[in-house]
Amino acid sequence: MTKILIVDDDELIREVLEFNLANEGYSISSADSAEEAIKKLSSDFSLILLDIMMGGMSGYKFAEELRKKGNQIPIIFLTAKDTENDMLTGFSVGGDDYIAKPFSIKEVIARVKAIIKRQKINSVDDNKLIFNDLIIDVNAKEVSIKSKKIELTKTEYKLLLFLIKNSNRVISREELINTIWEETPYITERTVDVHITRIRKKLENYGSLITNKSGFGYRFNFVNQ
């Protein structure tokens, strides 16, 4: 059963989220502070619903600390802070989504389901990633759709694989440049956009899985298929 950790210092919000998400079939644990969440968090959780403004450690700081330790568990921020700068801060510290309070419980459930679905990459073994008819053979460095080989350049392949392996988060163009083109100077953000466009075209219907969050970057989004 998928486990979700709710972190919010408002008891009523915790109770509402616990009740409704449990009705959706999720296993729920909750904490009223980031400090308590640290004690409860374990590797079997699939998602954190995280308030930002709490006494003691803030949600931003908690998320930042998790990412520094290499913990990539998806995080949805729940907060009354809803300016563009607040959203940018949330994504910059490793958040995967951002829902402003007051929120519709239906919206929260939809976002939760989207994040959980995005995580589910079917893996035959450590060397193959499969999503429906799309297969990434890591050993052979080949991509195929319905057994038809898709001809990607070395850079396109590296870019696609990196997006898929990090599908739990939005990746900035700057990070893509530093990762994929680390040995190539003077690469611009436009170069990233051009490569993404080519990959989308080559992947045909699956190209729509690569989504752009305006102002933030790209994500391989399994929800769209």
Image: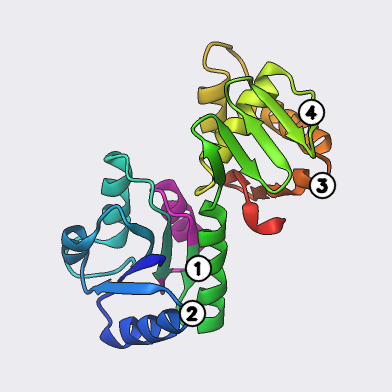
Q: Which residues are magenta?
A: 79-97
Alpha carbons under labels 3 and 1: distance apart: 25 Å
Alpha carbons under labels 2 and 3: distance apart: 30 Å
Which of pointers 1 and 4 lies earlier in the amino acid sequence?
A: 1
Residue 185: tell me if it is visible.
yes
Q: Is residue 170 above or below residue 98?
A: above
Q: Position of residue 76 (x, y in %)?
A: 44, 63
Q: Are marks 1 and 2 in contact (CB under 8 Å)?
A: yes
Q: From the viewer's perspective, is 161 left or right of 36? A: right
213 within the magenta span: no
Q: Position of residue 113 (x, y in %)?
A: 54, 67
Foreground pick, 145 / 4: 145
Which of pointers 1 and 2 lies earlier in the amino acid sequence?
A: 2
Alpha carbons under labels 3 and 4: distance apart: 13 Å
Image mark for residue 24: 2
Q: Are marks 2 and 4 in contact (CB under 8 Å)?
A: no
Foreground pick, 149 / 202: 149
Q: Amino acid at mark 3?
A: Asn
Q: Amino acid at mark 4?
A: Ile
| Label 2 residue SS | loop
Alpha carbons under labels 2 and 4: distance apart: 38 Å
Point out the frontmost of discs 1 and 2.
Answer: 2
Q: How many marks?
A: 4
Mark 4, residue position? 150
Mark 3, residue position? 205
Image mark for residue 112: 1
Q: Amino acid at mark 2?
A: Glu
Alpha carbons under labels 1 and 2: distance apart: 10 Å
Residue located farthest toward the front when viewing the structure as drawn = 124
How busy is the neighbourhood of tag 3: few (under 14 within 10 Å), some, or many (20 plus)? few
Q: Amino acid at mark 1?
A: Val
